[in-house]
Each structure stands twice: as C-alpha cells, then as structure tokens.
Image (spheres, helix red, strand yellow):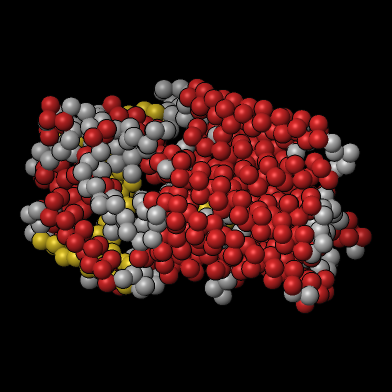
C-alpha cells in the first residue's frame, strides 16, 4: 500500500493524467458539438483543487508544463500569421489593425474604470479587448473568399493587434512591479524596441542561415525552432517583460524561415496535441466554481466585458467600412473575424492574474468572453461571408513557374513511378502510361534500395535483386501499353530522398505513387515516405489508390473548393483520363446553404469557364450543391463515380488547436478509387521550385 502511495506522489502521475485527459475529453466534447477546449477547461475544473483535487496547479510539473503551453500558444499564434497575405495589403492592414486595437482598448479601459479598477489594471483590461484570434479562418477558406480584400486586411491586422496588446501588457506588468518612474517607463520602452528588433530581424536572419546550411536535417531544424522560442521568452524576462511577448515575436521572426514545410507541421503538431491543451487544463484548475457562479451572478462586470468587446470590435469595423469604402457584408465579416478572443487574450489574462493585477472576477469574465466570442464570431462569419465577392479568377498558369515556354518540347514530360508493391504496380504503370501518352512523354519506373555502411552487405544485395525484378516487370508492362520506359535503380540513404533526388535528376514533371492508409501518432509526427516525398519534391505528386484499372475509369469526380489557379491541375488531370477512356468528369462545388443565388450562379459560370478553357474536348458536368456538411456532400456524390480527384492541402490551426482535416475524413470513408494531387514544395517567395514547360504546368500541377 505504501509503495502505491509513493508512486502516486511521483511527478509522472500528473503528466500521465493530463495525457489521458487530452486523449479522451476533446473528442467526447466534439461529438456533443462542443469545442474541445471547453472540455479541457471542464476537465481542469473537475480534476482541480475545487473538484476531485487530483491535479494541483502549484505542483512543479503542472506549473512547468502550463508555462510551456502558454509560451507555445503565443509562439504558434505568431508562427501561423500569414505573412504573404499581410504583405499584399500591409497599409490597410495597419489601418484596420490600429482601429481594432485602439477602439477596444479605449472601451476596455472605460469598463475597468467604471468598476473601480486602477488606471493600470483598466488599461490592461483594455488590452485584453484589443487582440483577436482568427478562429473563423477555415470558414472563409472553405467558402473561397480569402481573396476578398476585407478578409486579407483583417488577417493582416492580427499582427498589429497582438503585438500592441502584448506590449501594453509588458508595460502594465512593469508598472505594477512597483517603483515605476517616467524614466523607467521610457527605459523599458527603449529596451522593448531594441529587443523586438533583435528578435524580429536577428532571429529571422539566423533562421534563414541555419535552415539553408542544415539542408534536409529536420531534426536539427525542429530543435532550432524550439531553441529560438525559449531563448526569446527568456530574453523578454531579462529585460523585465513577460515571456509571452518574446514567444509571439519569435513566431513572427522564424515565420519566413520555417515556411509551410514539414518542420512547421511538426512544431505545430507538438503544441496542438500536447502543450497547448495542458495550458487549457491548467486554466480550468484556476476556476473556483462557487466563486465563478458568484462572479457571474453579479453579472454586470461580465456583461460589461462581453458587450464592450463586441460593441467596440463592431465600431472599429464600422470605421474601416467608411474609411476604405467596404460594403456591409465586408464590414460584418471583418467584425466577425476580429471577434474571437482566445490565444493572446487568455495568455495575457493569466499573466495579469498571476501578477495580482487582475482579479478572479476578471479572469472568470474573460473565460465567459472566450466562450461567447469563440461561438459568435464563426457563427456570424458563416452567415455573412457567403455573400462576399472575390476578384475574377485567374486561371492562367503562373509565369514564374515556367522556363522557356515554347522553347521546351512536350516530349520532355516525364512521369517517375516508384515501384515497391508488386500487387499495385500494374495499376500505377497504367496510370503513368495514360498520362505520358497524352503528353507524348516517357515514364521512369524507379526502385530505391536503402544504403548500408558496406556496399557488399547481404541486405543491400537482396534489396537490389528485388528492385531489378520489379523494374523488369514494370518495363514489360510499359511495352504492353505502348509507352517508352527507362527503368532506374538507385541506392540512397533514405527512400523519400532517393525518390525526390532521382525525380529532380530526371527533370520529372510528375511523380505517381501508390498510397496506403498509413495513420497514427508515429506517421503523423515522424512522417512516412509519402509525407516526406510531398515535402521534398520539386514537382507535383499524384498519390494513387485504385480499386480498378485506370483504363476502366469512366466517371470522374473533381471537388473544387476555391476557384484559384491551382484548381486547374485536378481538372486537367481528370480531362486526360476522361479523354483516354471516353468518360465524363463532374466538377463539384459544395457551398454554404446561406450562399446567395447570384453567388451560386457566379461560381457555376466560373467552373464552366474553367472546364471549357482547360478541358475543351471533354464531356463534363457541373454541380453546385448547398450542404452544411462538405464531407457528406462529397461522399454522396462519390456513390456514382469511379474515381475522385482531390488536392492535398496543409492543415491549419487556430490558436494552436487543431482543426479537423476534411481530406482525412474523406479518405477514410470513400469507397471508390482516389487520386490525391500533392502541391509541389514552394520556396520562401511562394514561387514553385519546379521549372516545367508552359504546356505542362497547368496540365498536372
């Protein structure tokens, strides 16, 4: 019995309990159609000192993990800022950022003064109003209205509101520390200015240099990013400001260096599944239910904070409407996007509460504010965003991704087919042959043997013999299909690197790979061969899961989410197969039920333009389906199809909390053949790294 009690007092016990909570609670709440973070807060309340008293927020383990989660939350918030979108409208983003910062700051300060808080605490309450979290970004992305200027401006304004709110927090905490004179205030502001410049420019330069020199060593790159965030957090504390200021600036600083590569995916993954959920559980530990009920019972402070925030954000969006001549739908969208208060607001509130500057009543009111705005903001966005207009779709290929245009010949079109599984090899070769025939190109069957320390190792010899047998079979299949094949056997340290390097050496236009359903923690965190090829490849990658021969495919479904130039690629892919088999392709767009009739008609006309321009000789159909569940709508349409073609999209998080991946849900439930088109890796400037003929770029993409 004593040994059991000793084990229960081990520091590992709270960590094990936290892992169990994170694993089980959020999915349960999501099934109840409640946000997962609400479940984490509830778990903290139940397991905390005011509940079952299993977890204590004063325990060293809990405090450490919560602090890491707090830092990680703000770091991810900075890392997820879309710098490319910000640069498009930086002046208007700065204008709206100032409005949606200063107006709520004034309102919040007034609320604080009304409830007898000192000037310092009142200004801090105002800063809590000033920031916002883009929880509704997935909604505007799904509706295809991210290209609307008002949306881009609101996204860019996040940088100004979050930085401004954190700087106000830093000054308020510094003043609260005592003996604060005007000289010390200006000294702190000066150090903040120098510190911010060092982090934003120094870490950006260091990150670019390190990533350039470290090559494909993702492990070291991952460690560099973690070191950057915690060094920035410690540096902030050294100059007398809160560590979350440094964490957010570090996220902005390494943003360009990390890009949208696999390192960012891993960094965000670690935060969203481990440290950030622990932070929300710790927030729940702070909630005293009787005190919470009492503070809510005296509802005036809570009501003032909630109404003041909603009203001030509305007023800021209204000012922007008149200044920049936006319409009412755009104004309401800006308002709804800037409403949710999650990441920066919660982090700053916890810091102010721990410092004794904010009361428990303010903490409880901010938690209510978070729940209200996190629900209301996305709800309003889903209602008003469908009516937004977007610029005319540019369906032309990106000229920056061509090299010589007409000087190139279509005969340079090359399809690399990695072969490994004899059972799926025939269908892969058939698919590659159809594409290569259409472009009058060639296919390169590729087998990669993993290198050993000794080139005469028996395992390597067996692997080479197996690869040669697979390549002989691939060559025979190619001859049957009447297409030129140039088999290639390669020895490499890593299979994914071998595929990517060989494809680059062959100047491949496309890689066609077989695709199994490999999931789980290890595949998600460490990646698998397919993940790594997608990240490394200079050209598009077609992941193929076929239930019948490509020559038998007649009905092809192409879901189109957003009308962008990238939508050309799956359409052209489908067109080649449809022409080869005298089949039909269907372009499907699932829209919100609130989408106006005129917007649906416009979308249909754009899809018709897309099909007529890039698949002029194909038999195609267009379907605009209003449905509240995109996955269900696509699954319904797939019941009468042979093949569905999807685009691979990187996941996005909001405030560090993972958002469900529609593509993953689709893949798990589809009962027909599937092709997933992976986008080529893009450089820091956003320009595709592949250099392909003008004809080929829009063909497969």
Q: Quadrant of residue 24?
A: bottom right
Q: Is residue 265 visible?
A: no
| Residue 529: image location, x then y, percent | 41, 42
Q: Quadrant of residue 321?
A: bottom left
| Residue 603: image location, x then y, percent | 25, 62
Q: Is residue 376 visible?
A: yes
Residue at (69, 68) in percent of width and height: 304
In what quadrant of the picture does the N terminus appear?
bottom right
Q: Is residue 364 left or right of residue 692?
A: right
Between residue 206 and residue 516, name the one nearer to us.
Answer: 206
Q: Is residue 692 above or below residue 10?
A: above
Q: Is residue 238 above or below residue 293?
A: above
Between residue 185 and residue 517, name the one nearer to us.
Answer: 185
Residue at (25, 59) in percent of width and height: 558
| Residue 587: image location, x then y, percent | 22, 62
Between residue 114 and residue 657, name the one nearer to us.
Answer: 114
């Amino acid at each position: 019995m004593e040994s059991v009690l000793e084990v229960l007092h081990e520091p590992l016990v709270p960590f094990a309990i936290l892992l169990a909570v994170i694993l089980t609670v959020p999915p349960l709440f999501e099934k109840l159609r409640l946000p997962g973070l609400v479940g984490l807060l509830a778990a903290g309340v139940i397991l905390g000192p005011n509940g079952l008293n299993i977890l204590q927020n004063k325990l060293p383990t809990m405090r450490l993990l919560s602090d890491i989660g707090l830092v990680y939350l703000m770091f991810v918030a900075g890392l997820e800022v879309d710098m490319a979108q910000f640069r498009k409208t930086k002046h208007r983003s700065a204008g709206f950022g100032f409005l949606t910062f200063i107006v709520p700051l004034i309102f919040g300060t007034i609320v604080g003064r009304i409830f007898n808080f000192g000037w310092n605490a009142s200004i801090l309450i105002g800063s809590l109003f000033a920031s916002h979290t883009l929880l509704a970004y997935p909604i505007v992305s799904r509706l295809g209205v991210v290209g609307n200027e008002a949306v881009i401006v609101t996204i860019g304004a996040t940088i100004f509101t979050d930085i401004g709110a954190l700087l106000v927090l830093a000054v308020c905490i510094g003043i609260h520390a005592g003996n604060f004179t005007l000289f010390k205030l200006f000294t702190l502001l000066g150090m903040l200015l120098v510190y911010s410049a060092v982090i934003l420019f120094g870490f950006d330069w260091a990150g670019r240099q390190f990533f350039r020199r470290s090559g494909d060593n993702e492990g070291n790159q991952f460690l560099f990013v973690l070191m950057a965030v915690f060094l920035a957090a410690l540096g902030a504390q050294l100059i007398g400001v809160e560590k979350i200021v440094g964490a957010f600036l570090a996220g902005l600083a390494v943003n360009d260096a990390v890009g949208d590569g696999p390192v960012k995916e891993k960094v965000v993954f670690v935060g969203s599944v481990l440290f950030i959920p622990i932070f929300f559980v710790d927030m729940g530990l702070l909630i005293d239910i009787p005190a919470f009920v009492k503070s809510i019972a005296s509802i005036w402070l809570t009501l003032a904070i909630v109404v003041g925030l909603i009203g001030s954000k509305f007023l800021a969006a209204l000012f922007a409407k008149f200044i920049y001549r936006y319409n009412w739908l755009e104004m309401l969208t800006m308002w709804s996007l800037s409403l949710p208060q999650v990441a920066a607001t919660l982090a700053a509130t916890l810091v102010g509460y721990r410092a004794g500057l904010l009361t428990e009543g303010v903490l409880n009111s901010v938690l209510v504010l978070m729940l209200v705005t996190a629900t209301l903001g996305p709800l309003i966005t889903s209602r008003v965003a469908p009516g937004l207009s977007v610029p005319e779709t540019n369906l032309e290929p990106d000229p920056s991704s061509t090299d010589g245009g007409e000087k190139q010949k279509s005969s340079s079109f090359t399809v690399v087919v990695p072969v490994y599984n004899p059972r799926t090899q025939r269908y892969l070769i058939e698919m590659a042959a159809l594409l290569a025939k259409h472009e009058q190109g060639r296919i390169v069957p590729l087998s990669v043997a993993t290198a050993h320390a000794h080139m005469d190792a028996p395992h390597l010899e067996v692997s080479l013999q197996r690869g040669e047998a697979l390549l002989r079979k691939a060559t025979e299949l190619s001859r049957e299909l009447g297409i030129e094949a140039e088999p290639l056997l390669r020895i490499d340290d890593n299979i994914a690197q071998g595929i990517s390097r060989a494809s680059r050496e062959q100047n491949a236009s496309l890689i066609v790979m077989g695709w199994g359903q490999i999931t789980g923690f290890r595949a998600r965190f460490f990646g698998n061969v397919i993940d790594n090829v997608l990240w490394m490849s200079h050209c598009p990658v077609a992941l193929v899961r076929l239930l019948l021969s490509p020559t038998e495919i007649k009905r092809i479904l192409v879901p189109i989410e957003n009308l962008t130039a990238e939508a050309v690629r799956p359409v052209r892919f489908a067109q080649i197969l449809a022409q080869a088999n005298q089949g039909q392709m269907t372009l499907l767009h699932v829209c919100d039920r609130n989408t106006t009739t005129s917007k649906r008609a416009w979308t249909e006309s754009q899809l018709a333009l897309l099909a007529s321009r890039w698949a002029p000789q194909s038999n195609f159909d267009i379907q605009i389906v209003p449905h509240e569940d995109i996955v269900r709508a696509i699954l319904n349409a797939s019941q009468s199809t042979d093949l569905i073609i999807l685009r691979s999209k990187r996941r996005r998080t909001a405030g560090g909390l993972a958002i469900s991946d529609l593509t993953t849900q689709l893949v798990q439930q589809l009962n027909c053949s599937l092709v997933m088109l992976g986008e080529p890796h893009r450089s820091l400037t956003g320009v595709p790294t592949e250099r392909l003929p003008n004809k080929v770029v829009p063909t497969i993409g």
